[in-house]
Image (tube, rainbow, N blue to C red):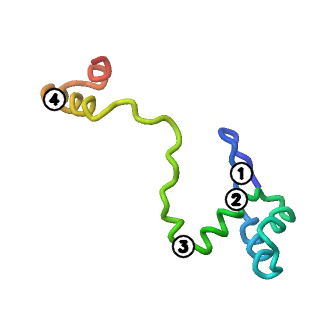
């Protein structure tokens, strides 16, 4: 188990294999297996969901971070400016 410095996330390297061993071979519930391994219950529930529903691995993840501030109008304006001023450098476009 490794903890990220930038954000609070936990990487379970070998625990996933051990979890499924307990879950299927020992017939433990997800809750009991996570308590035994020290894994967060939501991580285990997500693994079980993906196991039983293979389509869930294709679900889009929630977008994280800052959303785009510039709209389509801004994008079009910048593209038009670059088309009209082919020799424009980034600082000129940035200062518009």
Asked whether the beta carbons under mark 1 and mark 2 sit within 8 Å of each other, the answer is: yes
- How many other residues sit within 10 Å of disc 2, few (<14), some (14-19) or many (≥20)? some
Q: Secondary structure at mark 2?
A: helix
Q: Residue at x 80, y 65 (%)?
A: 31
Between the residue at mark 1 and the residue at mark 2, the CA separation in whole angstroms equals 9 Å
Expressed as whole percent of the image width and height from the top left, the position of residue 75 reads 26, 33
Asked whether the beta carbons under mark 3 and mark 1 sit within 8 Å of each other, the answer is: no
**Vertical order, 78 against 8 (above or below):** above
Q: Earlier in the sequence, mark 1 or mark 2?
A: 1
For the view shown, which residue lies furthest in the right direction? 36
Between the residue at mark 3 and the residue at mark 2, the CA separation in whole angstroms equals 16 Å
Task: Please tell me the numbered disc located at residue 40.
Answer: none
Q: On the picture, is 91 further left or further right than 25?
A: left
Quarter the C terminus occupies: top left
- How many other residues sit within 10 Å of disc 1, few (<14), some (14-19) or many (≥20)? few
Expressed as whole percent of the image width and height from the top left, the position of residue 92 reads 27, 20
Residue carrying label 2:
43
**Vertical order, 43 against 52 (above or below):** above
Q: On the picture, is 63 further left or further right than 92?
A: right
Query: Is 63 or 15 nearer to us in this picture?
Result: 63
Residue carrying label 3:
54
For the view shown, which residue lies furthest in the left direction? 84
Asked whether the beta carbons under mark 3 and mark 2 sit within 8 Å of each other, the answer is: no
Q: Earlier in the sequence, mark 4 or mark 3?
A: 3
Asked whether the beta carbons under mark 4 and mark 3 sit within 8 Å of each other, the answer is: no
Residue carrying label 1:
10
Between the residue at mark 2 and the residue at mark 4, the CA separation in whole angstroms equals 51 Å
Between the residue at mark 4 and the residue at mark 1, the CA separation in whole angstroms equals 47 Å
Which numbered disc, 2 or 4, marks the residue closer to the eye? 2
């Amino acid at each position: 188990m490794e903890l990220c410095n930038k954000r609070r996330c936990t990487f379970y390297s070998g625990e996933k294999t051990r979890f499924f061993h307990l879950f299927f071979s020992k017939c433990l519930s997800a809750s009991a297996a996570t308590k035994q391994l020290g894994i967060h219950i939501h991580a285990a529930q997500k693994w079980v969901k993906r196991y039983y529903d293979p389509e869930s691995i294709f679900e889009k993840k929630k977008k994280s971070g800052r959303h785009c501030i510039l709209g389509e109008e801004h994008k079009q304006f910048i593209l038009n400016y670059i088309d009209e001023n082919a020799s424009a450098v980034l600082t000129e476009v940035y200062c518009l």
